[in-house]
Image: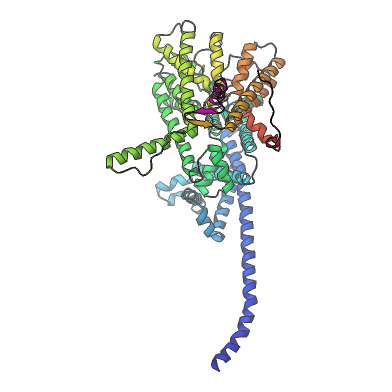
């Protein structure tokens, strides 16, 4: 009876509280949606603030005090600081679990640095703080933190755009075009140039830097300041690594927020074998780039003749810039006459060997460098197992990929063949006045630099026509796919050559190293070769129409150099009219993103009905 009484009292209470619980749950869900909506708005506002802050920082650095009111720029940067802080505090307050889950340790360091920017506002009198905290009151600290957060937020925005499943080819093309336009305006800033620079020349240099070509209508040494060289170096690095590499790096190692589609897209872009290997591959690419460029800078620094530079800082700047320019196959130089400078030519010649090694390293291709790392790790485990006397858990049957083997073999043949032919053809011509040792060094250099390096130590206009033909052939082939180099790529050349061999020998399939190359790869290689020939002929024809007074040989060489993003010239670049400069800018851009990829991204794809059609033969003699 007592239990029934209490059950009677409890029943109405539970009935009354059940609707209340439902309303509380609905309110919680609605509140959660509002929190997410505000978070999305703040992320969008942070993206806009990052773009505005980046522009303000570039203008602040590029203009002197007499040209622009820097107080306004500082206030803009302070507003961006406020937006970043507001977003951070909001996420910590209302989205703590999501923030803790998505943020990597690099972002926590960024949050700590952003919090420290409040110290000058909270304690305006720096005298009350110890001396080791005074650095937080400088503009350099604030600008550095805002720069990092701006880059990160811009990368987040780009990753969001990638998540909308946009065509990858168009993403790649528009990203390069975006940085070309930004770079063209940045290079015109007063503190970047020593003399006024027209926009078409700035656009040409920016296009050449992003496409890693090296053609220039102005003298880089005399026109640009060290700040201008810095911007050119940044454009070269962006063009070399690609926007997708930067955005994926920040997305994976700074915030941890990358969609499955983003990871699939990046995996295909860098040719990673699996999703789980994407992070290590990205780290390998960036590590290889920094390590090789660092070692190259040391090599260039040590090979520079004493007394060439009046100040030690100029020598360091030259070494850093030349290392980046060589590894990215860009072909720019910060000294007069480039690598043909008399001080360098009269030296021991070691700088040309260092530059050749950097050019070849940049032209090997990231997939092959990653394969080298995997092979080194495998050999290390084999050696470790032998030393410890333990059986190896798993032994790889094929340590090197077919792509790596083809690239190494083809590169070796082209390199040694080019060295021998240049040495033989120019021995008594352009190399006649050099000792035997320097003749060999210059032959090595001119076998490496036509492969997309673009540097010159001797004037190519003085070479024999037969030598120029060999150089143009090496320019046309270029380096490896997914590398810094241009051209049709040694992968395509090897596939076409093997296909030709298979046809001549009556083989039904294309094979190499006991592996059969897929028909799709062979078809794509043939398409690349055909499109490159059509593009070179088209650009040459257009240049000859616009400027018929130019020598035909020089125009053909210039067109080939632009399409293959090589950068060598017979001396007519500065004589081009603005229409020709614009045409070559488009040619360099197309050569960098790949004409075949660009055409595929525009939307020329059609529904494939070939598998349902009857087969027939055509007459091929």
Q: How many marks?
A: 0
Quadrant in which the N terminus is drawn: bottom right
Q: Residue at point 64% right, 73% down?
A: 22
Q: Residue at point 58% right, 34% down?
A: 65
Quadrant in which the C terminus is drawn: top right
Q: Does the magenta portion include 355? A: no
Q: Does the magenta portion include 505? A: yes
Residue 472 in percent (x, y) is at: 56, 16
Please, is residue 3 above or below residue 308 in the view? below
Please, is residue 81 above or below residue 476 in the view? below
Residue 201 in percent (x, y) is at: 63, 24
**Which one is nearer the viewer's eye here, 562 or 121?**
562
Q: In the visual, does 207 lie left or right of 102?
A: right
Residue stretch in magenta: 494-513
Please identify the quarter of the rendering in which residue 39 is found: bottom right
Please identify the quarter of the rendering in which residue 573 is found: top right
**Which one is nearer the viewer's eye here, 276 or 262?**
276
């Amino acid at each position: 009876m007592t239990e029934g009484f209490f059950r009677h009292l409890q029943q109405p209470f539970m009935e009354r509280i059940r609707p209340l619980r439902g309303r509380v749950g609905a309110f919680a869900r609605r509140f959660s949606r509002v929190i997410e909506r505000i978070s999305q708005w703040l992320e969008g506002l942070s993206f806009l603030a990052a773009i505005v802050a980046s522009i303000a920082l570039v203008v602040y650095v590029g203009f002197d005090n007499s040209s622009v009111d820097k107080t306004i720029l500082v206030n803009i940067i302070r507003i961006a600081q406020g937006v970043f802080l507001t977003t951070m505090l909001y996420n910590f307050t209302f989205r703590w679990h999501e923030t803790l889950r998505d943020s990597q340790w690099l972002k926590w360091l960024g949050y700590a640095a952003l919090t420290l920017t409040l110290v000058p506002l909270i304690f305006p009198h720096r005298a009350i703080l110890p001396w080791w905290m005074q650095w937080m009151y400088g503009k350099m600290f604030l600008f550095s933190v805002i720069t990092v957060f701006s880059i990160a937020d811009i990368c987040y925005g780009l990753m969001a755009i990638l998540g909308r499943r946009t065509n990858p080819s168009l993403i790649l093309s528009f990203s390069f075009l975006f940085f070309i336009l930004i770079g063209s305006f940045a290079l015109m800033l007063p503190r970047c140039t020593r003399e006024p620079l027209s926009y078409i020349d700035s656009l040409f240099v920016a296009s050449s830097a992003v496409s890693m070509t090296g053609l220039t209508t102005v003298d880089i040494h005399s026109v640009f300041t060290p700040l201008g060289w810095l911007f050119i170096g940044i454009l070269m690095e962006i063009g070399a690594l690609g926007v997708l590499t930067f955005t994926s790096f920040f997305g994976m190692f700074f915030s941890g927020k990358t969609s499955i589609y983003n990871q699939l897209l990046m995996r295909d872009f860098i040719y990673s074998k699996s999703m789980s290997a994407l992070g290590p591959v990205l780290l390998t690419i960036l590590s290889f780039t920094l390590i090789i460029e660092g070692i190259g800078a040391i090599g260039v620094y040590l090979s520079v003749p004493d007394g060439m530079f009046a100040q030690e800082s100029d020598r360091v700047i030259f070494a850093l810039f030349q290392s980046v320019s060589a590894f990215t196959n860009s072909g720019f130089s910060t000294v007069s006459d480039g690598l043909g400078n008399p001080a360098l030519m009269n030296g021991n010649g070691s700088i040309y060997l260092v530059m050749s090694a950097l050019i070849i390293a940049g032209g090997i291709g990231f997939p092959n460098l990653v394969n080298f790392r995997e092979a080194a790790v495998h050999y290390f485990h084999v050696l470790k197992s032998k030393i410890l006397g333990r059986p190896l858990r798993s032994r790889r049957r094929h340590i090197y990929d077919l792509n790596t083997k083809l690239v190494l073999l083809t590169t070796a043949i082209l390199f040694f063949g080019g060295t021998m032919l240049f040495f033989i053809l120019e021995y008594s011509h352009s190399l006649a006045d050099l000792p035997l040792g320097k003749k060999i060094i210059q032959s090595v250099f001119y076998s490496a630099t036509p492969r997309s390096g673009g540097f010159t130590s001797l004037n190519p206009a003085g070479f024999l026509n037969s030598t120029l033909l060999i150089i143009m052939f090496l320019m046309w082939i270029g380096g490896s796919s997914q590398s810094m180099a241009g051209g049709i790529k040694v992968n395509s050349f090897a596939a076409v050559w093997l296909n030709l061999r298979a046809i001549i020998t009556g083989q039904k399939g294309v094979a190499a190293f006991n592996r059969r190359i897929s028909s799709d790869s062979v078809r794509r290689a043939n398409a690349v070769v055909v499109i490159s020939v059509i593009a070179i002929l088209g650009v040459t024809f257009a240049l000859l129409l616009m400027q018929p007074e130019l020598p035909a040989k020089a125009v053909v060489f210039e067109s080939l150099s632009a399409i293959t993003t090589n950068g060598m010239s017979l001396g007519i670049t500065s004589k081009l009219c603005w229409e020709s400069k614009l045409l070559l800018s488009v040619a360099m851009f197309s050569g960098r993103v790949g004409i075949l990829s660009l055409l595929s991204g525009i939307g020329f794809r059609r529904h494939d009905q070939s598998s349902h059609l009857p087969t027939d033969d055509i007459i091929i003699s």
